[in-house]
Amino acid sequence: MTILSRIDPMVRLLTLAIALALVVPVTGGARDGAQFVANAAVFLLFFLNGVRLPRHEVAQGLTNHRLLWPLVAWCFGGMALAGWGLWQAGQGWMPPLIALGFLYLGCLPSTVQSATAYSSLAGGNVASSVVAAALLNLLGVFITAPLFSRLGGGGAAEFHGDGLLKVVMILLVPFVLGQVMQGRLSGWVRDNKDLTTWFDRGSIAIAVYVAFSGAVEQRFWQQVEPAGWGWLLGGTALLLLIGHGGAWLLGGLLGLDRGNRVSMLFAGAQKSIAMGAPLAAVLFAPAVAGVVLLPILLYHLAQLVLAAPIANRLSRP
């Protein structure tokens, strides 16, 4: 087995998307067409998520109140406040857009596939993990942008009704359509799991490529001094520690059984680039979005690298 094959496929694909944006960014008049393609890919991504999630599992998982509601509070409360704290602490130390990126990162919902997959590997409650991840992402459609705008005050992007409408049309509507079409398409999606999984990853990579291209066009590296990269790495490491340590500790304080505590860990600590990249395109100008996304890009790559050894450790008796 080669070293490359041991790296999570999503990490490889995101690295490729970033490298491609650095070498061949989409610029000028081509940006609108690329953004349309990215939005269409994200639409299909959330449509497939709707097809995959059985409605009976949603109903069953929603009854697990001891896990779900503390998880919602941690994701949009504890982690959002941690991101706000980093943003505040970074004033005058970090480049302003990177500091703002930590606030944006803290307000995002959990991953869907990754949190569920690693929870399963670690012996977590799979049904509750699936429902929790889906619920967090649905709530994120309505909570993330207003929460970010509220906590950021004048330093954050303004979020108006047209922005909410665009987010609903790109993220929520396709999920609902997927639920409606579940009876007809779930078999095909299940039989073509490898194909749809790669489509999921490709959709996220396209959104990252388009967003990062805007930052490359504006020569973002000239906006970030060498010390700023150090703050980016340090802030990301601190938020990873808070996310994982806080979620695990909260599960223990709540007296959750081991399966639910494992589910709390992965869903509570991980953050979604699938939500973060397309939402950034709505909230920020192209020249700003790529720099604001730097913390979530680094966090997402790091959480995938960390997830496998954590899951392997927790899976042991």
Image: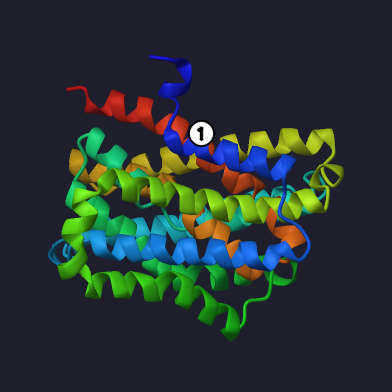
**Colour option used:** rainbow
Secondary structure of the residue carrying tag 1 is: helix
- Please, is residue 75 above or below residue 284 in the view? above
Asked whether the viewer can see residue 178, the reply is yes
Q: Is residue 68 above or below residue 173?
A: above
Quadrant where the image shows the N terminus: top left
Going by the image, does 308 lie left or right of 148? left
The C terminus is located in which quarter? Answer: top left
How far across and how far down the image is residue 90, in percent?
Answer: 74, 47
Residue located at (46% from left, 43% from top): 243
Residue drawn at x 34%, y 69% is 175
Q: Amino acid at mark 1?
A: Arg
Q: How many marks?
A: 1
> For the point 37% across and 61% down, which residue is it?
136
**As drawn, is 121 to the left or to the right of 206?**
left
User: Where residue 134 sits in the image (x, y, percent)?
Assistant: 32, 61
Q: Nearer the viewer, residue 289 or 61?
A: 289
Residue at the image position 47 percent from the left and 54 percent from the top:
203
On the question of residue 251 being in view, the answer is no
Q: Which residue, given by chain and number where applicable, does mark 1 sit on?
A: 12
Height in image: 218 above or below 1?
A: below
Is 224 on the left or on the right of 60, as rendered? right
Say left or right for 73 vs 192: right
